[in-house]
Amino acid sequence: MVKKHRVIAIVGPTASGKTKLAIDLAHKNNGEIISADSRMVYKYFDIATAKPTLAERDGVPHYLIDILEPEEDYSVANFVDVTKELIENISERGKLPIIVGGTGLYFKVLLGNYNLPRVAANAELREELENLAASQGVEKVHEILQKLDNEAAKRIHPNNLVRVIRSIEIIEAAKKPLAEIATKGDVSDYDIEWIGLNTTERSVLYERINRRVDEMLERGLIDEAKTLYEKYGKISSLMNTIGYQELLPYFDNEVSLDDAVDSIKQNTRRYAKRQLSLFLANPDINWRDL
RNA sequence: GCCGCGUUAGCUCAGUUGGUAGAGCAAGGGACUGAAAAUCCCUGUGUCCUUGGUUCGAUUCCGAGACGCGGCA
């Protein structure tokens, strides 16, 4: 039996101080950092994602930051594949892998010992199914999933079109039901130390979030967003990133800057709430108060 | 000062021919094994401005007052 690699996993809602804690722990434990964040993977998404600067990284190697162009697709399976190799590699060099980030799904799939093959996005299929939903209703699309994989269909609400479509996409590509494509082992491949950051008072976190958005604006969030919008237009990575998605209507003169900033703060608060809902369901996490 | 309109949920407002009220948004809770900063599900929230009167009963009708908005002086 092979000895399991030890890893530290740092999770928590946005603006809880994960980045700083990770760098501290890396210094103390001879560690290297793997980012588990679905937005920091993109080049140029710097201020909005609160990506640590080179100075902030303070000599600690960081992986899975700036690995994609904004138009490129990414998914959990990509993250898991690459991260498994990184953990292997870092451990072999006698260093400690520290995984940090806010994307709960990435932690769950990587450390929960799921095994999923990569299935790329299928733009034509997505468009076709979206059109079907628009013309004949979301139930029609859900029925397609039922015929392909009734078990999977039971778990997904018909209104949850994004997940219904992605499931169909995967099943069609693999020609098998989801349960056969994505398997789960009983025990994790890793010896994991879970650390969670949270506040007992929700309002404390919200104040941190509001303050951080103001700091982003001071650091040039608007210019960053404008440059990206002018260069790429309404691509999905921009439309699906808090901090950019709210500013695009401002650039199009549809909302005032004040309103756009308010919704950045509001969406960030709601995002933190969703993150917490997933992380709090994990009994292995040792929580620390900020 | 006079005339008119308004005051109901955190906000914007609807409503009760008199029987203590409901939408949207906000907020809270939750799901999540494949787009996850995405997506989806569930749930409330009340001195109906105050005070007298009429009434079995007033947030609703009548009087007075307060506050806000507009017009005239």
Image (tube, rainbow, N blue to C red):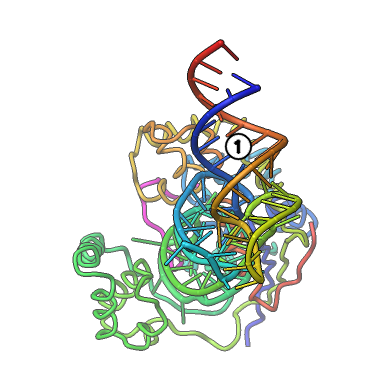
Asked whether A24 or A244 is in front, the reply is A244
Quadrant of the rendering where the C terminus of chain A is positioned:
bottom right
Q: Which residues are magenta?
A: A66-78
Quadrant hosting residue A210: top right
Residue A144 in which image quadrant: bottom left
Q: Residue at x 24, y 67 (%)?
A: A133
Q: A171 and A259: which one is in front?
A: A259
Please tell me which residue lies in front, A176 or A277: A277
Q: Which residue is mark 1?
A: A216
Quadrant, the N terminus of chain A: bottom right
Residue A72 falls within the magenta-colored stretch:
yes
Tell me residue B44's x, y (percent). Answer: 60, 68
Q: Is residue A15 above or below residue A4?
A: above
For residue B48, above or below residue A265: below
Give the quadrant of residue A174. bottom left
Q: Is residue A67 magenta?
A: yes
User: Please, which chain is the residue tagged with disc 1 on?
Assistant: A
Nearer the observer, A168 or A204: A204
Residue at 48% x, 39% y: name it: A44
- Where's residue A272, x and y in %? 61, 58
Q: Is residue A21 above or below residue A141?
A: above
Q: Residues within 10 Å of mark 1 (few under 14, many from 20)?
A: some
| Residue B69 x %, y % | 55, 28
Q: Is the stretch drawn in magenta largely helix, strand or loop?
A: loop
Q: Amino acid at mark 1?
A: Met
- Residue at horizontal 41 percent and vertical 38 percent from the top: A248
- Total labels drawn: 1
Could you tell me if residue A91 is visible in this image? no
In the figure, is residue A186 to the left or right of A183? right
For the question of whether residue A170 can be seen, the reply is yes
